Image (tube, helix red, strand yellow):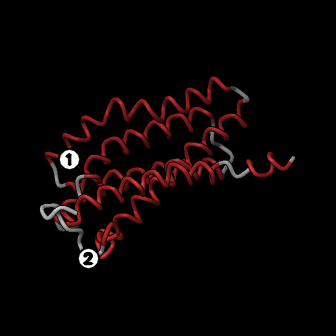
Amino acid sequence: MPQDAPRRPPGGRFGPFRHRSYLVYWLGVSITSLGTWLQAVAGSIYVYQLTSSTFLVGIFNFAGFIPILLFSVWGGQLSDRFDRRRVVWTSHAASMVVATILAALTIAGAATEISLIVAMFLLNVLWALGKPSLLSLVPNIVPREDLQDAVGLTSLGFLAGQIVGPLIGDDDAAVRDEA
């Protein structure tokens, strides 16, 4: 190793986990990502079960991804203009309200493909508005020497959710594979 190369902090690649605030943040990001992808897959399956329409499943997924394209720039502006913790808290609280209403409709047997599509759209508008603030919190909760590893671990948390969430959301996959 050249003499000018920076030395790794004592905690190595997992050094950011020494900071309680980052550990809580990382667990929250990972669980949120897992839930988001679980919901996307389970919602797609539910729309198909309700309608037997692949077109409506496509509309459901389009409603989930178009807000990211349309509203992420505004999310960045919110992050720059307002208290980032408040933006994150507000977007997550509003998401909880939408998800609770959707759960109540589903449990009552009153969920329709339209309510699922609208909920997916609203949830992802809130995600697009809150995610830039969420990501920009990392430099505030870890010291500079752990920042690079914290950014990498945060990405890992999001990716783990993208892998595990759909596996959980499609719990019938194992049954279909055995048949």
- Residue type, numbered disc 1: Ser
Query: Under tag 2, what secondary structure?
Result: loop
78 over 2 or under it: above or below = above
Q: Position of residue 166 (x, y in %)?
A: 59, 48
Which amino acid type corresponds to the residue marked 2 in the rendered image? Pro
Within the image, what quadrant is residue 28 found in?
Answer: bottom left
Using residue 18 as the reference point, say whether residue 51 is left or right of it.
right
Q: Quadrant of residue 83?
A: bottom left
Query: Which of the 4 quarters of the picture holds residue 128?
Result: top left
Q: Could you tell me which residue is drawn at 30 percent across and 76 percent down?
A: 18
Quadrant location of the N terminus?
A: bottom left
Callout 1: SS? helix
Could you say where residue 103 lies in the image, as x and y percent from the top left? 58, 52
**Residue on which the image places disc 2:** 10
Looking at marks 2 and 1 on the same chain, the residue that comes earlier in the sequence is marked by 2
Estimate how packed mark 2 is, as few (under 14), some (14 to 19) or many (20 or more) residues with alpha carbons within 10 Å.
few
The residue carrying mark 1 is 79
